[in-house]
Each structure stands twice: as structure tokens, then as C-alpha cells.
């Protein structure tokens, strides 16, 4: 019979790490005497990052003495103590290869249910003083698992662990962990996993995403269960290719469009509605190129591409294009990219934008108009006035083709010639309060693009109006919001070239397209993630060892080499920056 060997608890603490501070509850210590196990945790225990740990589905973490002995031999260590792996229950028995998702156990006065394998992150490596640990736990099939509390009660070291029932499908913790994190993801196994009611909602969502990928076409590989970056088809061409400007159109007082065609006259590969192009410019031949991304605003499937650019007063790229681009000029352009794309289906669609944020949702409106009038569409847009209202006539023509479409146009400062009820719907900003009062359909998919504060407020208003958060999609211009779990908030810094490279800095160039900087690589940085952090480029990561795919980034040009190799390859055209280095000049969508 399995036995509870130790009960371990610990409250979050601040730990110095890589020049920053991590808030973490991974340090646990064994306690004596009985402890109450409650719905969210064990008395005296806490989690530093509730986004990745804790909560009802992850109330208690379990790890086994069998795995302790395995790692002691594998790592050549003898310094382990109970709680070494951040677990609440150290147990004898309950192997990951025997325990099944949905199994129920009685321990002392508590009844608990297995919900998912441990989600490994860098903090277990921090606790173990072994940076590879997150990857090792998965690669060696020894993750440990979480329990949900069915009946609260007291537990104590020495309690017997009595199995009450076996989960349906009898899928072991090790099998479930491999299904998500390792290559393969067989369809029948995904369906089997989804038939387990006890599986936590997060893992259910990951398996559904993998299943969608298994059933879809045009996949570029990768792990959809771990990242949306794997949902796009592979890029239509590698790196940059020349495209010719065939038309330049003023869309408003500050927005102009460039129509691009192939230099051989052949139709360009179709883009998905909502995607963007990345353009490489050379305003100063003596300096590194300037790389910018612009949303595609034209009709998806057209033989040419149209990008729309807002001329910023001090924008290097937009000023160069506005002042120097001419019909017949050639631009270096990377293939269409992006996961902010219109989903297929019959559900209503809400397209929300402010200013030049209309560009990606305009391509979605084109696609909806092409598909026919059956799908209900709401077009919500905010502009200063008619002079600044880009694409006004084009949008009206598209909406007129869809009898079920509705529009709300808000002018914050209408001009004297702007006509209410004709040019705009309401005077004032397209605010969260306005959105809340529109009686939008709760089953809609919403797509929001505009300034960061606008997207945040509107997204909140949409969810308050009853639209599920998972159905609200946003597209930020510029850098993406950072994901750095457990790190204490710090003031955002402008991306910059490092003042002191660790070496001579004569390696290949690495360009961070969204951040607008190009720097020479030096092996002293370790990984591309380390380089990005040295440049204060906003980064997104969790495991830092090639497991979780949070860092998966579009590779606009170049190739990378991995150390260590990722457990599951990224999608074609992407890279895992946490464990890779450049093999030559590189352009990343960061």
C-alpha cells in the first residue's frame, strides 16, 4: 500500500535570480503532526504564481520517493530533502506510470482526485539548482501530479493512501504528460484523454487544440496544445523576397496604403485574414536595416498584397516610406505571418478597432463579405473625425453587401462637415461603456485592434457583455506583452543595444523586428532569450529549456541551432529562443 511519507508546505518568498527577483512558493519544508487539506491548498502552504500553480485543480502536488532515488543516481546527488521538488506530498508508491488521471484516493480524512501532471517551469530548476530540470522531468517521464480536493480533511505523515476508484480510460500520468509534451499526439489518444472528466480544464483545452491540429490541413507542425504560434500554416517563402510597389493610395490624413506584387507578375500566395507582412528598409545604407511589420488590409486571396501604414511624426520607417516610396520601387518583404486571424464557422463576428487598428480587421471584413451574408457581423470603429477616418467608403461598401451587418462609428472630435447618421454613429470615443451598451451577441468571436489601453478596456467590456474571454482576440502593434512568470514587476525599458557585450560582438546580426533593433551576436549571451533580455526586449517564457513553447517566436529570416534539443520541435518557420543560438544572420518577430 502507498504511504504518505511527508507533508511539505511553504509560503512564497522572494528569491534573487539573474539580476531580478522571483516570487515563488517552490521551497517547501516537511512539517510534523496533522495538517488540514482544504479546497485550494494545504494549511500553511501558498503559491507565488497562481497563473501556473495552485487553484482548485492544482491544490496539492505529489512527488514520489521512487523518483527521488532515480534523480539522486542520475544527477549524482545526495543532498535531497522532503519537498525538494516543490511537492506538498512526498509519497512511497503512486508511480507516474501507475497512477491514472481521475484516480481517487483517501489519505487520512481527505479524499483527493488526480487532475493532471505537473506543469514544469524554470522554478523547479531554481529550487534544484539544476537549470535543465524542467526538461528532464518530462523527458524521463517523472513529472509528478496534482490533486483536487474532493473532501477536505486532515492528513499526516505515515497515513496510508487508499485507492477508492480508477479514472475512466485508465490513462496514466506519464501517458498524459507525454501526450502533450512529446512528439506524436496520436488522435485516438487525444480523444481518449478528452473522455476523462477529471482532467483539468487547462489540459482539456490543450488536447482540443492538438486535436484541431490533427484534423486540420496545411499544418506547419509544432505543438498547438502549448502555443498559438503553431496554429499558422508554414510561411509561403523563407526569409525576405522582393515585391514591387504597384499602387500607392492615401486612405486618410495620416494613413496610406501600398499595393505589392511579385516581380514576375504571378499571383502572390494567399494570406489569412488578419495576418501581417514584415518589410525590411534601408533608409541609411551605412546603418543596419529598419524592419517593421504592417497588417494586410486588402482582400485575402487577391493576387497582390496591400499593407496600410500610419505616418508617425517621428517614425523612421513610415516617414521613409511616405517620403521615398514610389510605384515601381522594390521592397524586401517576409511572408504573411500572424495568429490574429479570422476563425471559420457560423458564429457572429464583432470587429473592433481604433485608428489604423482597422487594417487587420478590414481584411477580415473583406473575407466575411466574400463568404456571403449569412454570418452576423458587427463593425465597431473609432476615429477622430472624417479627415482621419481611413477606409470609410470601402467599409461602407462591404457592409452594404451584408444585410445582417451592423456598424457603430464613433468620432471623438467630429468636423464641421461630418454628418451624424451618415459619416458616424455617435460623437465621442469608442469607449468601454459604449461597447457594453450595444447588446452584442454572447456567442460572438471578437477581434480587437488598436492602442494597448483601448484593447484592454474594450476586451474587458466585451467579456462583461457576456462574450467568453477565449473568444476575444487582440492584435497589438509593436512588441507583445511580456510573459515572465514569477518575476516581480519592473519598469518597462525601451529596447536597446547592450552597452557591454560579453565578448567582441563580431558574430552574426540578430534583429528584433517588433522592437526595431539589430545587434551582433556573441556566444557569451548563451541563448537568444538571454540576448533579448540583455536588450530589454519584452520576452515570453516559462521553462527556459525547450519544453513549454511559451517562447516560440516567428523566425522571419535565418536558422538556429539548439542546445539542448527541444522535446517537441516548434512549428515550421518558428524558433524556441530559450534554447537556441543563431546559425547566421537572424530576424525574429520580437
Image: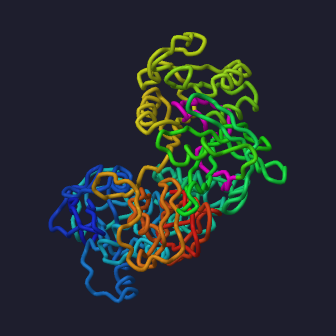
Q: Is residue 230 above or below residue 305?
A: below
Residue beneath the point at 43% across and 56% down: 115
Q: Residue 588 sits in which quadrant?
A: bottom right
Residue 502 visible to an observer of this rendering: yes
- The image quadrant that residue 153 belongs to is bottom left
Question: What is the span of residues highlighted in magenta in the rendered image?
Answer: 331-360
Q: Is residue 396 left or right of residue 314?
A: right
Q: Is residue 358 magenta?
A: yes
Q: Residue at x 59, y 57 (%)?
A: 282
Residue 171 at least partly seen? no
User: Magenta includes 386?
Assistant: no
Residue 71: % across, % down: 38, 82
Estimate the x, y position of residue 232 in percent, counting from the top left.
Answer: 64, 53
Left or right, 563 with respect to 213, comes to left
Would you place residue 401 above or below residue 529 in this image?
above
Query: Residue, x 67% and y 54% (percent of image)?
Result: 333
Asked whether 104 or 481 is in front, the reply is 481
Amino acid at each position: 500500500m502507498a504511504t504518505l511519507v511527508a507533508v511539505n508546505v511553504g509560503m512564497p518568498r522572494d528569491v534573487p535570480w539573474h539580476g531580478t527577483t522571483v516570487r515563488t512558493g517552490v521551497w517547501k519544508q516537511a512539517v510534523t503532526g496533522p495538517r488540514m487539506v482544504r479546497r485550494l491548498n494545504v494549511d500553511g502552504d501558498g503559491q507565488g504564481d497562481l497563473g501556473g500553480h495552485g487553484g482548485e485543480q492544482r491544490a496539492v502536488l505529489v512527488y514520489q520517493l521512487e523518483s527521488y532515488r532515480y534523480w539522486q543516481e542520475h544527477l549524482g546527488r545526495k543532498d535531497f530533502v522532503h519537498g525538494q521538488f516543490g511537492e506538498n506530498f512526498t509519497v512511497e508508491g503512486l508511480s507516474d506510470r501507475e497512477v491514472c488521471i481521475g484516480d481517487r484516493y483517501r489519505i487520512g480524512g481527505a479524499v483527493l482526485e488526480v487532475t493532471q501532471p505537473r506543469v514544469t517551469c524554470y522554478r523547479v530548476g531554481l529550487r534544484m539548482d539544476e537549470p535543465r530540470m524542467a526538461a528532464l522531468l518530462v523527458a524521463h517521464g517523472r513529472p509528478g501530479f496534482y490533486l483536487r480536493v474532493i473532501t477536505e480533511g486532515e492528513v499526516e505523515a505515515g497515513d496510508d493512501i487508499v485507492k477508492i476508484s480508477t479514472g475512466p480510460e485508465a490513462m496514466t500520468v506519464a501517458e498524459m504528460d507525454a501526450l502533450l509534451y512529446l512528439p506524436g499526439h496520436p488522435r485516438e489518444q487525444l480523444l481518449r484523454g478528452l473522455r476523462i472528466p477529471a482532467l483539468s480544464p487547462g489540459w482539456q483545452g490543450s488536447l482540443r487544440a492538438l486535436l484541431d491540429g490533427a484534423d486540420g490541413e496545411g499544418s506547419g507542425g509544432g505543438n498547438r496544445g502549448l502555443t498559438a504560434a503553431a496554429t499558422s500554416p508554414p510561411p509561403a517563402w523563407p526569409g525576405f523576397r522582393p515585391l514591387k510597389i504597384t499602387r500607392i493610395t492615401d486612405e486618410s490624413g495620416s494613413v496610406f496604403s501600398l499595393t505589392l506584387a511579385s516581380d514576375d507578375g504571378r499571383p502572390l500566395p494567399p494570406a489569412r485574414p488578419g495576418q501581417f507582412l514584415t518589410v525590411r528598409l534601408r533608409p541609411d545604407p551605412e546603418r543596419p536595416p529598419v524592419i517593421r511589420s504592417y497588417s494586410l488590409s486588402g482582400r485575402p486571396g487577391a493576387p497582390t498584397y496591400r499593407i496600410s501604414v500610419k505616418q508617425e511624426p517621428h517614425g523612421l520607417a513610415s516617414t521613409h516610406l511616405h517620403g521615398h516610396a514610389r510605384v515601381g520601387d522594390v521592397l524586401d518583404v517576409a511572408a504573411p505571418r500572424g495568429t490574429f486571424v479570422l476563425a471559420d464557422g457560423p458564429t457572429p463576428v464583432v470587429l473592433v478597432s481604433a485608428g489604423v487598428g482597422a487594417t487587420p480587421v478590414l481584411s477580415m471584413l473583406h473575407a466575411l463579405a466574400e463568404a456571403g451574408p449569412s454570418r452576423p457581423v458587427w463593425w465597431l470603429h473609432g476615429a477622430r473625425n472624417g479627415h482621419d477616418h481611413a477606409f470609410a467608403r470601402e467599409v461602407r461598401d462591404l457592409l452594404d453587401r451584408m444585410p445582417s451587418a451592423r456598424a457603430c462609428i464613433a468620432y471623438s472630435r467630429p468636423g464641421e462637415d461630418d454628418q451624424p447618421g451618415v459619416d458616424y454613429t455617435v460623437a465621442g470615443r469608442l469607449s468601454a461603456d459604449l461597447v457594453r451598451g450595444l447588446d452584442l451577441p454572447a456567442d460572438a468571436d471578437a477581434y480587437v485592434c488598436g492602442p494597448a489601453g483601448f484593447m484592454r478596456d474594450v476586451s474587458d467590456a466585451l467579456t462583461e457583455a457576456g462574450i467568453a474571454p477565449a473568444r476575444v482576440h487582440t492584435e497589438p502593434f509593436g512588441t507583445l506583452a511580456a510573459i515572465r512568470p514569477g518575476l516581480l514587476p519592473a519598469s518597462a525599458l525601451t529596447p536597446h543595444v547592450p552597452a557591454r557585450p560579453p565578448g567582441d560582438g563580431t558574430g552574426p546580426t540578430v534583429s528584433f523586428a517588433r522592437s526595431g533593433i539589430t545587434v551582433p551576436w556573441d556566444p557569451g549571451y548563451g541563448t537568444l532569450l538571454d540576448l533579448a533580455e540583455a536588450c530589454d526586449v519584452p520576452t515570453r517564457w516559462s521553462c527556459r529549456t525547450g519544453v513549454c513553447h511559451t517562447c516560440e517566436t516567428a523566425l522571419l529570416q535565418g536558422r538556429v541551432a539548439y542546445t539542448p534539443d527541444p522535446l517537441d520541435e516548434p512549428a515550421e518557420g518558428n524558433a524556441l529562443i530559450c534554447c537556441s543560438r543563431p546559425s547566421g544572420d537572424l530576424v525574429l518577430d520580437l
